[in-house]
Amino acid sequence: MWKNIDIAVEKTTKLKDKPEADKLGFGRHFTDHMFLMDWNRELGWHQARICPYQPFHMDPAATVLHYGQAIFEGLKAYRGDNGQIYLFRPEDNLERMNRGAVRMSMPRFSVDLVLKGLKALVYLDRDWIPAVNGASLYLRPTMIGVDPYLGLKPADTYTFYIIMSPVGSYYSGGFSPTKIYVCRDYVRAVKGGVGEVKTAGNYAASLLAYDMANKAGYTQVLWLDACERKYVEEVGTSNIFFVLDDTVVTPPLGGSILGGITRDSVINLAQNWGMTVQERPITIDEVLAASRDGRLKEAFATGTAAVISPVGELFCDETSYPINGGAAGPLAERLFAELQAIQYGRGEDPFNWRMRVG
Ligand SMILES: *Cc1c(COP(=O)(O)O)cnc(C)c1O
């Protein structure tokens, strides 16, 4: 499928040295090749190509550098036990990116073409996919406006590219819970804004709160809604779930929350296991009251990077609320095991989420 495609391939003449599999970290190393294509008003998307990984030449007036027309995605390629290569729901990432393009006045692209390019790129650089359990190859499709023009308007030229980075297991030290800081001072997104889009500015705007949480000894921020600062929205760059008694609760996608593919997968799996899942507004007060009453059994965050990240403690208004005695809960453990089994090709794939590349 990745053969005989209308995407020009220029291979590098010098392969890079690969980092050691146990020292990968996240997003520090990049593979030998990248995918690129260009857009202008006359030709639309054109010149789809794979070429050696290299820096861009960019005009200092490029619109992305001033007004932030930038959207991106994050997904992974996984190496199965017998060397097979899998992607997880890649079309969902690309369709989400296209929805983001519309919101950011950027051009849409053909999901089929980009998926072809993405698979060809993964296959070409397949030796970079770590064969270590929990490790993977992180893929970063990105689109930016590149006109040299300082007037504020949608750009007339865009670059789309995909770079890839081998990443280590998120849980090399075990499936350990995080400590979360409930942020009252800053907000991430408002309905009607761009919170549901993976656009660069959202992340720049989150860094100060993240710093504050870090200084207080917490790894991530729990965001509340921007209007009333009352409803739970997300945790860092992940969606959030609570288990209240036997019910799984997660905030609804109302425009200010990023619709995670892991979030959707978790909802489907839990429902398939016969659990009650509610997508409904939930206040931080309800969560903290449930913690005091012993009804808050578990909390966990979901996202491509960590898959499932159990929350062991919430810190809100100078008070600490331990969850499940600070340990990972049974549902978080089960979801993590099940999603990994699907992603690494070790288990059944009842929802057809897995896509084989090679
Ligand atoms: C990427 C992201 C998520 C998680 O989405 P996945 O598709 O599950 O990786 C959640 N929240 C924010 C703000 C994100 O950027």
Image (spheres, rainbow, N blue to C red):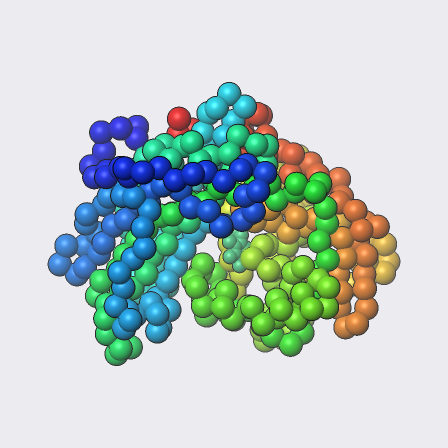
Q: Residue at x 64, y 76 (%)?
A: 185
Count the numbered circles shown.
0
- Residue 333 seen in this snapshot: yes
Q: Quadrant of the N terminus?
A: top left
Q: Position of residue 262 (x, y in %)?
A: 55, 45
Which residue ends up furthest to the top in the rendered image? 82
In terms of depth relative to the viewer, which is nearer, 21 or 69? 21
Which residue ends up furthest to the bottom in the rendered image? 151
- Residue 112 seen in this snapshot: no
Q: Position of residue 314 (x, y in %)?
A: 75, 61
In terms of depth relative to the viewer, which is nearer, 128 or 138? 128
Q: Residue at x 71, y 41 (%)?
A: 174
Q: Position of residue 275 (x, y in %)?
A: 69, 40
Above or below 67: residue 259: above
Q: Residue at x 43, y 38 (%)?
A: 17
Q: Quadrant of the C terminus?
A: top left
Q: Residue at x 46, y 25 (%)?
A: 84
In terms of depth relative to the viewer, which is nearer, 225 or 28? 28
Q: Position of residue 37 (x, y in %)?
A: 25, 50
Based on the displayed image, in which of its 4 quarters is residue 328 positioned? top right
